[in-house]
Amino acid sequence: MTKAKTNVKRIAIQGGYGAFHEIAALHYFGKENVEIVPSNTFRDLFKSLKLRKADNGIMAIENSVAGSIIPNYALLRESKMKIMGEIYLRIIQNLVVLPGQKIEDIREVYSHPMAILQCQKFFEKYPQIRLIESIDTALSAKEISDKKQKGIGAISSAQAAEKYGLHVLFPSIEDNKVNYTRFLILGDKDEPLASGEPVNKASLHFALAHEIGSLAKILSIFSYFNINLTKIQSLPIIGREWEYEFYIDVEFSDYSMLQHSLDAARPFTSGFGILGEYHKGISIM
């Protein structure tokens, strides 16, 4: 009788097996005693965490070429989940098809909108190909395999092509070869997952009054306490015309200085919250 695995960590991802989310998850958590929990959408990913169908989640938040995945900021804030870590994954996009297909045969190519944005220059050479958005890179590859779809391609990872028995017709079709996606590691605890590594990064959110200099005051506070601002993203506040919620990432070398800066900044904001304090992520080629 095979002995059941113990201490298996269930990781919720957006997309199917072979998706870049799975690749990033296995780099972060390792391949031993990890169970991947696929989700069709990012909202479904958060549902898996809320219902405790998964212990942790991993969610793409921005790409170095295509930019931020804007809706995920609001999903994260509304979920009350915490950022417990991060990882940067080098994204290599491939045009994958059924074995035996040639580029002249391909009429349509499916993939996630972010993947399509990353491959615009390649498809300019093939104006006869229609690019169609789907929910996931790997699931697009899987559908071609399951339905034996001729004349159809997908933009996906090489791992997805291998898993679903597809042929990589053109490898590395991304426009920019310095193409990284930042993934956040999510959970319902406040402490980072990486043991033994100091907390040196934080993600925050807050709203500001619609008045001159309100954001400048916050930025000057962080500068005074030697806090490095690495990311700022604004989203409109629904129902409050021309008012915005700000999401920022900061890095620091002295945790006490972060605390001083937050204490100084809070009085100038509303709805101030900490999305997570964690160790700055590494880049995976």
Image: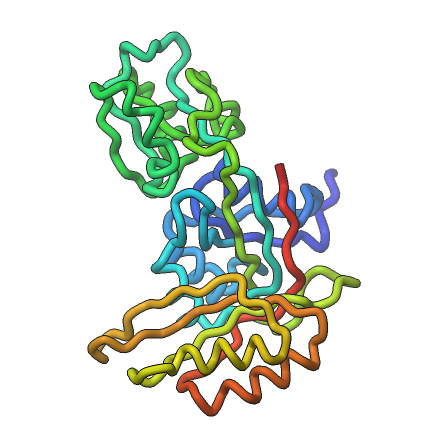
Look at the image and tell me in which quarter the C terminus lies.
top right
Residue at 45% over, 52% down: 62
The colour mode here is rainbow
Residue at 46% over, 59% down: 48
Look at the image and tell me in which quarter the N terminus lies.
top right
| 263 vs 132: above or below | below
Residue at the extreme bottom: 267
Q: Is residue 70 left or right of residue 126?
A: right
Residue at 40% over, 72% down: 246
| 242 vs 124: above or below | below
Percent of width and height locating residue 249:
53, 66
Q: Is residue 120 left or right of residue 63?
A: left
Percent of width and height locating residue 272:
46, 82
Front-most of residues 262 and 69: 262
Percent of width and height locating residue 67:
40, 50
Q: Is residue 118 left or right of residue 126?
A: right
Percent of width and height locating residue 226:
63, 74
